[in-house]
Amino acid sequence: MTASRHPPQPPPLVLPGRAAAVAVSDAPPLRCGGGRTPGGCYSECPAARAGLVAEEKALFGGWGLVIPDQEEVQYIRVVTKGVVGRSVMLECGSSLPNIYFWGFTQPGTVAIRSLVYGYGQGPRMQKLASTLGELSVISGSASLVIDKLSLLAEGLYTCQALYDSNEGANVTFYHIQLLVLVPVSKPSIVVSESSPVENEPLWMECRLENGTGPIQYLWEREGQDRMVVTVAEANGSLVNLTGVNRNHTGWYSCRARNEVNEERSQRIWLDIIYGPDEPIINITPYAVSDRGYTAVELDTVSLLCQAPSNPPSQYVWFYNNSQVYAGQQLTISKILRMHTGYYTCLAQNSFLNTRTKTTVTLTVYYLPDGNPTCNILPANNYTDLTLWCSWEGGYPLASLSWNPPLPGESEKAGGSFSNATQLRLGSKTLDKSTFTCQASHPALKTSATCTLTAMLPPVEPGCFAVATQNNEYLMLSCNWEGGSPRALLQWVSGDGVVQGSSEENANIVVIKSSGAYSGKQFVCRAKHPLSTGSQQCQLKLEAPVLVTQRSVVSVFEGSDVQLTCVLKATYPASEITWYNNQRKKVWDAPQKYLLHREAAWANLTVRETDGAQDSGQYWCSATNAVGGAQIPITLNVQRYPSPPNVTISKILYNTRQRTEVELEWATRGTGDLTGFVVERQMSSRSGERGAWEMVANEIEPHMRGHKIAGLDPGTLYAFRILAINHRTRGYPSEVKTPADPPFNAYPAVIGAAVAGMIVATVGTLLVFQYVVRNRTNNPRLHNMLFGMPPAESRENISNPEDEEGAGGLQGPEGGGEASEEGGAAASSPSPPTDAPPPVNVTITVTATS
């Protein structure tokens, strides 16, 4: 014992080793001759109790222990069940006693045999324990666990536990009756006959090899419909059937269960032999008359014979007593009228050698071809209606009748075979009245019908005129469709002359195109049986009439302009054609012209107008079958005002290599400008001058200088500058050739310094080099060292006349070449008569060497 399990106690009782020799099997039996009670426990009686007391004294009295009064000894009786092969626990208190003894009494005996004991040195197993299973004592207690329980383990287990305490020793006896149960094994079914004949007796048994009773048996059957039903439930394993029938056919299984488990047997198939019954013939499609079954010609007819039997019946078909087919289902594809007759089905059971048969009559009917057809026709010059229905052929003939019948018409008069006709007054027939022709035939499951509706066309008559290609002919078209019956249409000219013939639904008259029809009316008259008043539509032919929003359009050169033409009146439709200022047809050419057409108007867009090519008169023309019209539109393309004149103020080679030229210029006079163009002319060594070519364009209007590189030093160049106002070019400037750069004294100074002042003049050379390279940033220092340039080569550009003026007169584009005398002077070509006189400019250029 430990302090954590019990309160403080005296030192534990230690038994000598000879305690193992105590033979508890010699103790008196613990029962009163009655054996086991129905509850499974040994009966309590004075003799048994006295025996227990004597046993206690024999066990503990010899060791000087004080055994309390027998009334203070506790007796606990328990019934426990275990399953063979599994585990079971036998409890002997919840804590470990100081001394405990386990004993076992087999059923039918009175001797208690020792299993295990413990007195502070751990459990001691006896040989008997190995025959009962695998025994073990639970740690910290005296309870037993028996694994792999054996059938021999069933019996009475006694645990005698002694607890030592300060108040004395406490003794508890545990009597545990262990019942070892055996699970039921998998059952098997034994049947007296696996294939009995219907109405014969039958027995079935559910057999088991092992299992502790009581055992319950449950029989189940799964029929051909896969429904599982309970056949029997009882304590016995045998089922008797005095007379089986076909309903007993199915899968049978039995379930056996006891207190431990439940097991199901394998299924067996119980096959009941019977039949055949009297055959039943089903015919599809299904139709019956007073003479038997009927079928429709050309349909696929199937005759199915069903005679329940086990094993399944074998079928033979006879037509008019002649065998035609062997099998359950006789199928006739596209049955004919000649197949009418008697059909017999013979069913036989080969196992029982029994036969049955059934005979039916089949009559083949055939319907008229197609379906009933209906039509509604005009009568009495389109004032009345005729209803007509037909469905000819077939056997027997189809019966036809109109619904609703005429007022006062008898049923006999309203019906007939194959076709039916009915006359109705148009004035007494409402619009959208519906009439049904009903057909009946023996081959029909339901009557066949065709339906028609008498109705006016949903809209008013419509007229229109269309011209043929090239306006050679004119077609007058009149439509009044959608009515039933169809309406009658006729064309009449305005003076009452009938045009063409009368037609139903639509009427088209073709006449030769002529301007004489312009302003003339044509009327289409329409008649319908349901129309009480006259219906008509009319049209008036008109030659085209054109108008424009602006007859004169002005635009600056280079802009896009749109010319508009509107077709104010025309019938029939006209095609609009544009002609340009050269009287040529304008097609949709995106490079120059763009056409945009709608229903009654057309726009012509002239792109990037040019004063010399696009100014003039344009024509919008329209024609139809009865005439034509055209309207002129004048386009004035104006040039932008001439930009101011330009003078060259500076033209100089940058270096001695003569590969780059710097140009500076100024403007004279007033006028708008959008940029400058520089042109050059090359002269050969023989003096021949080449053509002027542009070397710089898109020069911003605020610029007054430009550098030209990539020149050939051996070629003589001349340059001129032109101001541009949009597309209008001003007068070219005077023609000038570039001069060489001013004299550079840097080499002479270097030569003089080399003569005797190489070292002293190094600083001076550096200063000269800096001044020469930065003459623009230090003009005063440069002029002080190298002198001022001649006055003739400088242009004062601070005067107001050199600034760009706002506005100006229009000048010519381009300019003539000016003669060069001494490489300096040039003059401008003569301006146009409407331009202001040119400004006379004389510029003298002196080249220094």
Image: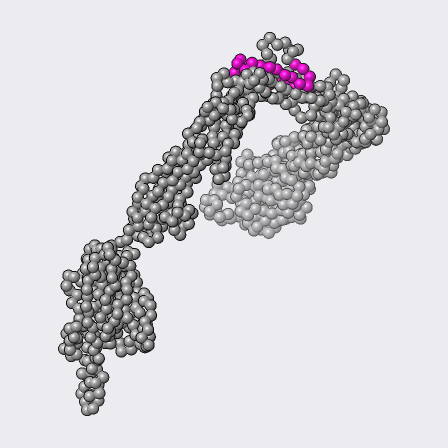
Left or right of residue 827: residue 488? right
Q: Is residue 422 magenta?
A: yes
In the image, residue 581 sits, relative to residue 318, either above or below, namely below
Is residue 477 at all visible to an observer of this figure?
yes
Q: Which image quadrant for residue 257?
A: top right
Residue 441 in the image, given as x and y percentages of width and height: 69, 19
**Residue occupying the point 38% across, 47% down:** 580
Where does the magenta region start and end?
Answer: 415-441
Q: Give the camera-side residue of 186 and 297.
A: 297
Residue 836 in the image, given as x and y percentages of width and height: 21, 57
Q: Give the camera-side residue of 671 and 18.
A: 671
Left or right of residue 168: residue 78? right
Residue 170 in the image, given as x and y percentages of width and height: 53, 40
Q: Give the camera-side residue of 431 and 26.
A: 431
In the image, residue 94 sits, relative to residue 202, either above or below, namely below
In the image, residue 840 sits, relative to residue 180, either above or below, namely below
Residue 511 in the image, given as x and y percentages of width and height: 50, 32
Q: Which image quadrant for residue 786?
A: bottom left
**Residue occupying the point 58% across, 38% down:** 173
